Image: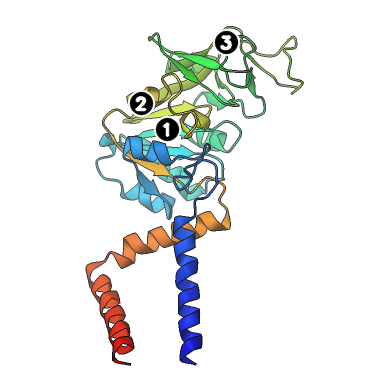
Amino acid sequence: MSKKKNAVFIGILTLLILIVLYPTVTDFSIHNPGWNGFSKLKEELKAEVIVENFANTIYSIRNSEETAVITIAYRQYSADELEALRNYLLQGGTLIVMDDYGEGNAILEYLKVPIIITSNAPLYDPFDNFKNKRFPIAKIAGKDEYIVLNHASAIMVSEHGIESVKILALSSPFAYLDVNNNEIWDKGEPKGPLPVAVSIKYGKGTLIVISDPSIVINSMIDFENNLEFMRDIVSEKKVFLDQTHIPKSLHEQLKDMLAYAVSNYVLNPIILVGILLVLFTLISRKLIR
């Protein structure tokens, strides 16, 4: 019986170690060191990661004006989460919405801002690009610097919002939105220059919208001025990186659960002492036998 218990214990421990150590392949995940992960972004911005209780975490942020929240809008937001983001902006926070074909417009509609992400049409540039039209290059406003996009969309600003919206980055005049998805420009389809990053004041805070979260994945973050662009946006603020709105595999969910448990329970001094005492007792019994 003792051998069976030991085998079960070793099996569970091995599984936990594999969950922690084996990297994930989830898009935009801080646990993913591969080409499509966000592990570099987290380190470069020294970001605090949100993996659970998104709305409660946003509500709990102190000194909002000294912080920035980055959310990758690939999963739906609840009414409570949307209200938490609105309140965060009103209190002076900087909200950075990064999205191309996800749920970013749900946030923009809730906030009633004159901005729309063209999530139904990809942005192509057959001339001013990195290696093909799906990697268009955009100029950072007011600078001789550029960002490289990756299967991006664009941003449309309504006429009544032109004066209140600040353009942060624009595609070249050769870019276009492929509305009918036939991969060529057709008459009537929007042509460049088109905004790919904008900002607008909201209450005491600032809303920033970027129509491509891929500019800061591990394989793109060092292209042209991609990293510098993000650093300029967050400035010296404390950064919170939302991981609750990206699609996650079971492996990714288990990693987040373990990280949350460790940071909230295992690292609690009293609980940590208790765990050490239990381990010490078990080891002592083994040695006595």
Q: Nearer the viewer, mark 2 or mark 3?
A: 3
Q: CA distance from mark 1 to mark 3?
A: 26 Å
Label 1: few (<14), some or many (≥20) within 10 Å?
Answer: many
In the rendered image, which residue does mark 1 sit on? 96
Q: Secondary structure at mark 2?
A: helix
For marks 1 and 3 on the same chain, the one whose residue lies earlier in the sequence: 1
Q: At which x and y percent is residue 263?
A: 33, 60
- Position of residue 148 relative to residue 106, above or below, is above
State the separation of the CA atoms marked 1 and 2: 9 Å
Q: Which residue is mark 3?
A: 128
Which disc is residue 63 wearing? none
Residue closest to the eye, 268 or 38: 38
**Where is residue 186 shown, x and y percent of the image?**
75, 12
Q: What secondary structure is found at the residue carrying circle 1?
A: strand
Pick the residue in front: 6 or 160.
6
**Disc 2: CA contacts within 10 A as few (<14), some (14-19) or many (>=20):** some
Q: Amino acid at mark 1?
A: Ile
Compared with 211, 188 (above or below) is above
Q: Amino acid at mark 3?
A: Asp
Label whose residue precedes the other's in the sequence (2 or 3): 3
